[in-house]
Image: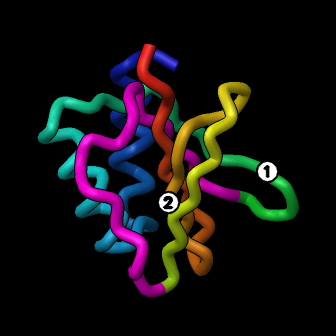
Amino acid sequence: MCKKNLLKSLENNFIFMTSELNKILNKELKSGNKIKEIWKGKWGKENILFILLEKPFKTAVQKNLKEISFNNINDRHYWKDEYYDKKKHILLACSFEK
């Protein structure tokens, strides 16, 4: 997906994100992390909005967020870490350092 379409997709789906995930994503972008991939579709049994960042999370990990889980996946076939909104089925993940 080209960068223009990627950003448009994110803008269109922003209303579905929780304010906590918005805050985390905005902090990551301000810290220099970039969006590598966005897609919406089937993941396991759920339809999710998936956002993958280019680098590992640069901001402090938050583990006590309501309705949002943090998981250390640590699988190079997938990604390093993720935040998952259990209610809205939104996954914000980060890649490994290259």
> What element does badge 2 sit on?
strand
In which quadrant of the rendered view does residue 66 lie?
Answer: bottom left
Relative to 32, residue 60 above or below: below
Secondary structure mainly formed by the magenta segment: loop
Image-based side of 26 in relation to 45, left or right: left
Task: Check disc 1: other Cα within 10 Å, few if <14, some if 14-19, many if 20+.
Answer: few
When the figure is inspected, residue 63 is found, relative to residue 32, above or below; the finding is below
Q: Would you say 84 lies left or right of 57 here?
A: right
Please give the label number shown on residue 83: 2
Q: Secondary structure at mark 1?
A: strand
Res 77 → quadrant: top right
Three-letter amino acid code of the residue under disc 2 = Tyr
Residue bounds of the magenta highlight: 48-66
Three-letter amino acid code at the position of disc 1: Lys
The question of residue 97 being in magenta is answered with: no
Q: Residue at x 53, y 52 (%)?
A: 82
Towards the viewer: 9 or 42? 42
| Residue that badge 1 annotates | 42
Residue 24 location (% of width, % of height): 28, 58
> Is residue 63 located in the magenta-colored stretch of the structure?
yes
Distance between the alpha carbons at the discs numbered 1 and 2: 17 Å
Q: Nearer the viewer, mark 1 or mark 2?
A: 2
Residue placed most toward the observer, 5 or 79 = 79
Q: Nearer the viewer, residue 32 or 38?
A: 32
